[in-house]
Amino acid sequence: MSSAPHSRPFQRLLIANRGEIAVRLLQAARELPGAIETFGLFTQDDRSHCDLGHPHHSIELPSASSYLDINLLVEIARQYAVDAVHPGYGFLSESAEFAQRMWSEAGAIVIGPGPENLARTGNKLQSKELAQQCGVPVLATMQSPTSNEEEIREFIQKVGFPVMIKAVDGGGGRGIRLVREEAQLENSIQRALGESPSRTVFLEKAAVDGFHHVEIQIIGDGTGQVRHLWERDCSIQRRFQKVVEFAPSLMQNRQLISQVIDSALKMASAIKYCSLGTFEFLVSEVRNEFYFLEVNPRLQVEHTITESISGIDLVQTQLLLAQGRSFKELGLGDFGNGSVLPPANSHSIQLRLCAEDPSNNFALSIGKISDFTVPSGHGIRVDTHVQISTAGPLIVGSNFDNLLAKIIVTGSTWENAVWKARRVLADTRISGVKTNLGLLKGILMHTDFMAGHTDTQWLSLKLDETRQLGEAMAQKSQEAELAGSSVQNASATNGLTSSNLLFRKGDAWSLTLQPLTQETFTASDKIAHHLKLSRVLRNDFPHSLTADIEYTTPAARTAIPYRLQIESTTTAASALVSTSHRRGDPNNPRHVMLPLSGKLIEIQVSTGDVVAEDQVLAFVKQMKMELEVRSPRAGTVQWVHEMEEEEEDVAEGMLLVELAEDEKADTRLKGKL
């Protein structure tokens, strides 16, 4: 079997990805001189990236899992005579098998570091061995992967807590658990194993408190020549998934950063790295030490901020290297080769806007996006696949990543970039799904963020504070909108806005009525009361609805004005997942409802089982991460949902378990625990 080449000329490029990165890749390819024919992939319910990226050819896949089907993708490459494939990030971007088979069976190169480098760097343990061979500091680590709990405990006895459990083949925050004490260990092991395709993990001593997550952008030509494009700070994370990134880092000790960059260059040169790669480290400025973490042998989600401070189009550079261009031809001849240059005289921030509910443990939010507005301006870039058109709203489901957009803001100083980002988020409008927009606002408003005091544990420790700051900022924006819309609506026909009321059969909501005058009355039970919706002030149903109503009662001679504001909803948006499931009643204490949408992968109780309060009842997968559903109270299972498939799409609010009225359940449990 011949080894796949690092580069060669190509004319027909297949984008083996979706979403905002597919748009980015398609646009970059179409901007290059010469005739590169592009091919995009889509599924029946997810094709907006093709509509925005405008590939020359769009190919429909049978299902979401097709993006991971090597046999199918190889066949597509053969059928359309594709001679190059760009996998983006995620999916098969780090698969050495995919790169090798594309070349050997279809004659197409997979743009990236190649099968050999993928095999060497995609495996976390092998990349740590490379670091040790190059004299780069690493944390104490298990020497081989395992699924044996006894081996895991033996390692912990040697190094002590805290430790990090990592899936050997995890990525994007999946398969990673921080364990600080014995009580967390068993559950963390099982969850990490469940998120590992090979069901194997390894452990390393954790370096978390006061450490920053710093990554170095590397470019290699496959001959041993490597260049760097400075560093990115990706410390603002939740459950090891990045939320906000910025470049360069705000560390004052540039000598320490220089050592980190030199370490990345040394490792990349040793294996003759090709194409783009990110070498990640944990860095403590206080302790003046750093440790190698892992290599991401592909284009990164946060490549945008490096592009902003360097002025280099990383995607086009990657494509041109794959076509055989040299560093000299690309203007990289003497750029960042060994000697560490000072960072560019600008600062860039990337904000990941996701469809999720931070107030509900960041549960995936599904639904139809009916409004999506992110403002433009100097230094503002938005990478997204969301497009609101006459063809219909974009649907957010449970099959794919929930990233809606990457908002990239660049300023001449750090303070300028932060203030610019605050303005952009304040003017951003999204409706149809819940998002983390409020959390992003709160992060930017926090004094620690402006001061650069944000390590890898910061967001988890400051989560409540940042959410409250975001909510306060949103409240001010809403009040300003209401004041403006009251003037605008004064001349509107029938007092209603032009937006459509998205009330549908099956929708229900709870609301508050606040009197706009001090007048009171005594209600009569015998005569009907009358509510008239007179003016809609804010219509983002089902997430928010503010309106004026006229309330006429038997005791009042004239209608009394009230302000109506929705507090919570249970809407037909959940029908995007399933309409056949029983829905729970939030007012029924015996109902255990799903607090989030996703794929139900396991139910751990049966009818007749006695469960304890906070006992795990089921697991729901969101974007390959397993999340627990726990019982809010003790009781005996009277009814439990029966799964029809191995992985079943489920919606927030679905009834999972119904408990019997059993006052003796707690007594029986005490004898069992």
Image: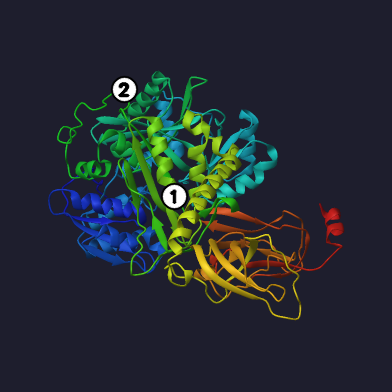
Image position, residue 368 (x, y; %): 45, 65
Report which quarter residue 313 is drawn in: top left
Residue at position x 43%, y 68% in the image: 492
Question: Callout 2: 10 Å neighbours few (<14), some, many (20+)?
Answer: some
Report which quarter residue 270 is drawn in: top left
Comparing 437 with 141, the one in front is 437
Image position, residue 243 (x, y; %): 47, 43
Which residue position is annotated with label 2?
340
- CB under 8 Å between callouts 2 and 1? no
Comparing 241 with 609, the one in front is 241
Residue at position x 74%, y 72% in the image: 523
SS at mark 1 in the image? strand
96 versus 283 height, above or below: below
Extreme left residue here? 34
Q: Is residue 3 left or right of residue 507?
A: left
Report which quarter residue 472 is drawn in: top right
Image position, residue 610 (x, y; %): 78, 62
27 versus 289 height, above or below: below
Q: Is residue 624 left or right of residue 190?
A: left
Image position, residue 558 (x, y; %): 64, 72
Q: Is residue 437 left or right of residue 271?
A: right
Q: Is residue 430 left or right of residue 71?
A: right
SS at mark 2 in the image? loop
Comparing 356 with 216, the one in front is 356
Q: Amino acid at mark 1?
A: Leu
Which residue position is annotated with label 1?
353
Residue at position x 62%, y 62% in the image: 594
